Image: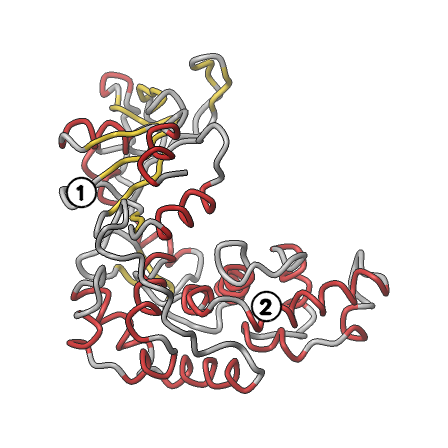
Amino acid sequence: RLKPVQLAGTTVSNATLHNEDEIARKDIRPGDTVVVQKAGEIIPQVLRVVLEKRPADSVKFDFSAFLKERGIDAERVEGKAFWRLKGKGDPTQTRRRITHFASKVCLDIDNLGEAVVDQLVSNNLIHDAADIYRLSVEDLLPLEKFAQKSSENLIAAIEASKDKELWRLIHALGIPNVGAQSSKDLVAHFHGLPAIMRASPEELEAVDGVGKIVAESIHDFFRDEANLDLVNRLIHYGLRIEEEAPAAAGENAPLAGKTVVLTGTLPTLKRDEATAMIEAAGGRTSSSVSKKTDYVLAGEEAGSKLDKAQKLGITVIDEDAFRQLVGK
């Protein structure tokens, strides 16, 4: 949090510090005066501390002590930059897990946003994602801003989510290190949730796009009794758990075997539309740029991903070039 300052045409009062390691690397402390810039001309970030203005009583920020003072039981994950809450019964965790489950990038349940989830959890109507499939119109009517029609619409949206693509369900489960693309890769390889649940770490690691860490995360997730109970209840409520293998794009497809990273805002295509076109052309998407990236599809305000692609010499294309590449 910053004292408000004018920066590149806007008033800035917050800047990203990324994580504990970055704060320590730059030695940023409460009360410091800092130099701030807009990364990629968009995101405010702290460049450095003005040490000559540091208060005499300055002390380093202690993540562990900060959490303990607030009664938060968390641990730093080995080899990772983040802290993770330990207790699964934490109400904040519960709300966020369910909100993630219902979000647009997962099961895309209309009108089941953060505010509604907060009401449902606060009124003890749901305790996890599977509980939403037990809800009735009568359960919703007493809630704020719910009438007969809005209650019926939400129940209908929940029912419709049962038949969403399997990769959405896998992503919605919140398996550590497993995002939308990894979920799609798993479905393309195994074609069913039971097969994924039974798979060994070695079998999981054989999936294109799944490395050792991701494979271990998936395997460990399905060995946890609480997670198994959640998944089995979702299966009981009739969610789709099997999916036929999609038609192969073929070796001669424009993007066969290629990895594409999307960044910025495209002129006419939404991100999910561009992703569908990439997959239809035999390619796959990734959220980060690396030496394994074949193309970066860049729009306006592309930011750091574009910078990294240029440094690595990766081919950068705009929407017009992308359409020509995939024949659209």
Amino acid type, mark 2: Ser
- Badge 1 local density, few (<14 within 10 Å), some, or many (20+)? some
Q: Quadrant of the C terminus?
A: top left
Image quarter of residue 248: bottom left
Give how far across and how far down residue 181 sits, in percent: 34, 57
Left or right: residue 113 compared with residue 182: right
Give how far across and how far down residue 292 sits, in percent: 16, 46
- Residue drawn at x 47%, y 27% is 267
- Residue drawn at x 41%, y 79% is 227
Give how far across and how far down residue 16 sits, in percent: 36, 34
Q: Is residue 115 visible?
A: yes
Left or right: residue 242 compared with residue 110: left
Image quarter of residue 59: top left
- Badge 2 local density, few (<14 within 10 Å), some, or many (20+)? many
N-term-proximal mark, 2 vs 1: 2
Left or right: residue 45 compared with residue 292: right
Q: Quadrant of the N terminus?
A: top left
Identify the disc placed on residue 161.
2
Image quarter of residue 55: top left
Q: Nearer the viewer, residue 189 or 261?
A: 189
Identify residue for label 1: 290
